[in-house]
Amino acid sequence: MQLVLSDDQMLLAEGARSFVSRSCPTNRLRRLRDDATGFDAELWRQIAELGWTRAPFAEEHGGLGLGLAGVICITEALGRGLATEPYLSTVMLGGQCVAAGGSAEQRAALLEPMLDGELHLALAQQERSARFDPFEVTARAELAQAGFRLSGEKTQVLGGHVASALIVVARTNGAAHDRDGLTLLVVPRDAPGVEIVRQRRVDAAPAALVRLRDVELPRSAVLGEVGGGAAILESVLDRATVALAAEMLGSMTEALERTLQYLKERVQFGVVIGTFQALKHRAARMFIEVELCRSAVMAAARALDEGRSDARELVSVAKARANDAFLLIANEAIQMHGGIGMTDEHDIGFFLKRARAAEMTFGDAAYHRNRFAELRGF
């Protein structure tokens, strides 16, 4: 497996990094964390115009067919700017669900306007007691005369506060922990019985609490097969996990570069602190962790694109490495910046907040190490 960018991917990565550097400064988080939407609508329009929303989708669905190898070039750049725009929620979660299981009518109604940046989607999957298990679902969709009657609650729905439609994971049969019996349903945000409450995460990225009370849905709301949603859900979450790991890679790289620059400038006791051997050793470890994470993310992306048998294992390797590395680097960055790193006026603290939130999204390091072991038969 070749763990380097192709010429086209290198151009995409450089262009994405340049765009984010110009358009997405980290200090804008102070404004966006109190904003109703939590992101910049104009920046999202520009992202769509650049074609980034089309990157992971097949050409027959209106996409560019760049695969995950192309997507991680984009999300790594977005991570450098700690972007809160709903790329992960709309493109890699909701959009991928529609592309994987949607009918021609559903793709026309949802996917096409999403690709143009005119419609937001969200995957309502996580529940309070699930603790990263995607198959622990208690929300139920019962057969009704016209179709289904849906009830339940979903937490930490990324981008749910602005989504025009939610892709809700509900149980149509089986027990709470069963893999079988899950169904994906398209739920309009204005459907009677739907309540969406904006949540504010520690990293300023917006999410939502979704309550569903006897929501009536037609049979045409089903994505894929009734009771067969687990395969779609698992595939989409794996791809989104790699995209998130690449975003974390971008964030930790930016945090490291800012810290190295500070070590070259800060003078203490009449000496530049970057000359202290102890800090050199710690900086070297941070660099090594970034490079190990980069290799793990690239390997997972290429394995999924190629349909390799060990792809799911490599996804867990990538997320576990990203969790550990980002937390280490974000903590070290604040330590090396000293007292100023603890203040809200300095941007370096935003990286630790993002690391904490990203760690708990799609599974922490312990979860993915256990998943890797189970996939290996242990």
Image: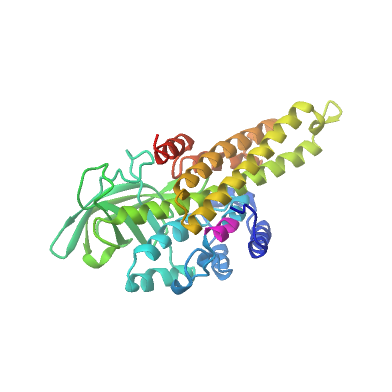
Quadrant in which the C terminus appears: top left
Q: Depth check: give the residue in front, 286 or 20.
A: 286
Please tell me in which quadrant of the rendered image residue 257 appears.
top right
Q: Depth check: give the residue in front, 370 or 14.
A: 370
Q: Residue furthest right?
A: 270
Q: Position of residue 87 (x, y in %)?
A: 50, 58
Q: Is residue 162 left or right of residue 135?
A: right
Q: Is residue 304 magenta?
A: no
By what rule are the colours in the image chosen? rainbow
Q: Which residue lies furthest to the left in this view?
A: 145
Is residue 345 visible in the rendered image? The answer is: no
Q: Looking at the image, which residue is at 55% across and 40% down?
A: 321
Q: Where is residue 354 in the image (x, y as percent from the top left)?
A: 55, 43
Q: Position of residue 17 (x, y in %)?
A: 66, 57
Residue 334 lies, with reference to residue 193, above or below; the image says above
Q: Depth check: give the residue in front, 287 or 35.
A: 287
Q: Is residue 261 left or right of residue 119?
A: right
Q: Is residue 268 left or right of residue 9?
A: right
Q: Where is residue 324 in the image (x, y as percent from the top left)?
A: 55, 36
Q: Depth check: give the residue in front, 119 or 303.
A: 303
Q: What stretch is highlighted in magenta?
A: 68-74
Q: Looking at the image, which residue is at 70% across and 31% down?
A: 282
Q: Is the magenta stretch mostly helix, strand or loop?
A: helix
